[in-house]
């Protein structure tokens, strides 16, 4: 996967600082609909100023969790605290929260300006202040020149930005966004991802975003909670969940991955050796994993961490070195994807940047190739 987190690292992230109290605390929250458990004992702490993504497949419970934060659903068990206050029994309009829905729900008969001003009018904010705040927000989302248009005269991306301006104008401390970029095409989506991160950083609002798009979560968020069947499978920064997934599920959900099944043959503090029939070679990893020899594990290796070559690499000791036949090549412009079939039948996915022109591509269909990777490339998964 090409996407990399674009957030600038700060000195000590709030979730690493034991002195910081979380802004949102979800404490063993469960939501049942009849017998069905949609959210299953979820605990999460989210800090002020975070751009936090809830990522998961369809039906994993993301939206239900978001709706409980907003107050549109009541937890069956557990508690939600926002800014230290227990939200039990507090209706949506009394929470320091605003929610931007999947459908945007703009008023069709109102202009862009009137749509953005609506919430402030309801709160009886004085007119001159409404004018200033609406203008400020429209500038922020770069829609100043469309103030007098109606929603049907806008593109999907512009409508999305009106909805965003409308959610931000009330200056909520916490903004909940449900698939905010769902209606946009790929190019607009990428552009808007950057805008959203910039806006969030400038205003310092805490964002919690629901998405099923892992690339989007990787690009925008400070941290990601991966959800599966109502539970949190892993919480971490984009690079943590990508580089150090804690399970087969997370490794396969975030980006593409090759999973090699094997058995631990040696386990020391500085390395682990895994015998893998599937890979056709021993897998050597340069750190211990604290599981006894004989344990069945999987080793996850990302496609971009594997090098393809027609000749065996120099000084190869047979570890982390597989052989196979190139079965498929997908040329994507900036990079190519190779599907290589190993002797045992397993297909391995390898990505390589196209640093030379395509016509000079040295590896082609049905070539016999060596696949090699570094001792730090593999992640051992026990669940
Ligand atoms: P998607 O990405 O498809 O929106 P999601 O992760 O947001 O999925 P939720 O909308 O939270 O999923 O739904 C989680 C589960 O709870 C689903 O199986 C859904 O059918 C169920 N569910 C949600 N709301 C209700 C409801 N009001 N009554 C019964 N079941 C519900």
Image: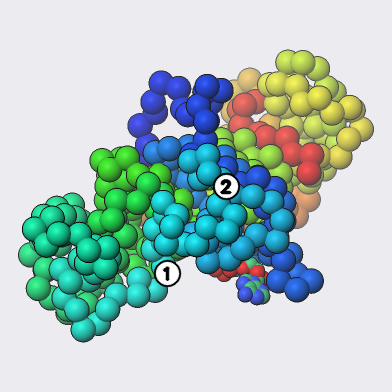
The vertical placement of 176 against 291, above or below, is below
Q: Position of residue 97 (x, y in %)?
A: 42, 54
Q: Nearer the viewer, mark 2 or mark 1?
A: 2
Left or right position of 375 against 194:
right
Left or right position of 100 against 227:
left
Please state which of residues 125 and 307 is positioned toward the viewer in this rendering: 125
Q: Position of residue 358 (x, y in %)?
A: 36, 51
Left or right position of 353 against 314:
left
The vertical placement of 206 against 291, above or below, is below
Which of the 4 image quadrants contains residue 273?
top right
Residue under label 2:
86
Q: Position of residue 54 (x, y in %)?
A: 54, 53
| Dot 1 beta carbon under 8 Å from ligand 1 | yes
Residue at the location (74% across, 39% down)? 381
Residue under label 1:
102
Residue at the location (40% across, 44% down)? 206
* Residue closest to the far bottom: 109
* Marks 2 and 1 in Cβ contact (< 8 Å): no
View quadrant of ligand 1: bottom right
Q: Which secondary structure lies at badge 1?
A: loop
The vertical placement of 110 against 51, above or below, is below
Tell me which numbered mark, 2 or 1, is placed earlier along the sequence: 2
**Neighbours of disc 2 within 10 Å: few (<14), some (14-19), many (20+):** few
């Amino acid at each position: 996967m090409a996407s990399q987190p674009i957030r600038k690292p700060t000195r000590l992230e709030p979730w690493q600082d034991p002195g910081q109290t979380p802004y949102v605390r979800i404490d063993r929250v469960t939501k049942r609909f009849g017998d069905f458990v949609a959210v299953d004992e979820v605990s999460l702490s989210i800090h002020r100023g975070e751009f936090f993504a809830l990522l998961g497949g369809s039906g994993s419970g993301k939206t239900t969790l978001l709706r409980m934060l907003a107050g549109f659903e009541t937890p069956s068990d557990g508690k939600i605290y926002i800014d230290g206050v227990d939200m039990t029994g507090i209706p949506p309009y009394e929470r320091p929260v605003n929610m931007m829905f999947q459908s945007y729900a703009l008023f069709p008969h109102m202009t862009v300006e009137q749509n953005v001003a609506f919430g402030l009018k309801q709160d009886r904010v004085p007119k001159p202040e409404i004018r200033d705040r609406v203008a400020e927000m429209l500038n922020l989302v770069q829609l100043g020149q469309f103030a007098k248009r109606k929603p049907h005269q806008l593109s999907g991306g512009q409508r999305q930005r009106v909805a965003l301006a409308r959610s931000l104008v009330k200056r909520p401390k916490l903004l909940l966004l449900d698939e905010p970029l769902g209606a946009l095409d790929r190019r607009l989506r990428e552009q808007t991802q950057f805008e959203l991160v910039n806006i969030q950083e400038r205003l310092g609002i805490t964002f919690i975003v629901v998405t099923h798009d892992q690339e989007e979560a990787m690009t925008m968020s400070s941290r990601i909670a991966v959800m599966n069947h109502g539970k949190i499978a892993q919480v971490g920064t984009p690079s943590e969940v990508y580089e150090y997934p804690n399970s087969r599920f997370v490794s396969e959900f975030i980006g593409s991955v090759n999973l090699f099944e094997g058995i631990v043959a040696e386990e020391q503090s500085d390395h682990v050796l895994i015998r893998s029939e599937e890979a056709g070679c021993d897998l050597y990893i340069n750190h211990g994993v604290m599981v006894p020899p004989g344990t069945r594990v999987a080793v996850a290796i990302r496609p971009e961490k594997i090098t393809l070559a027609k000749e065996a690499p120099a000084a190869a000791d047979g570890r982390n070195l597989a052989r196979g036949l190139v079965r498929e090549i997908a040329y994507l412009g900036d990079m190519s994807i190779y599907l290589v079939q190993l002797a045992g039948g397993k297909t391995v996915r390898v990505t390589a940047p196209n640093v030379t022109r395509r016509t000079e591509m040295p590896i082609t269909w049905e070539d016999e190739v060596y696949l090699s990777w570094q001792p730090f490339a593999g992640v051992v998964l026990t669940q």
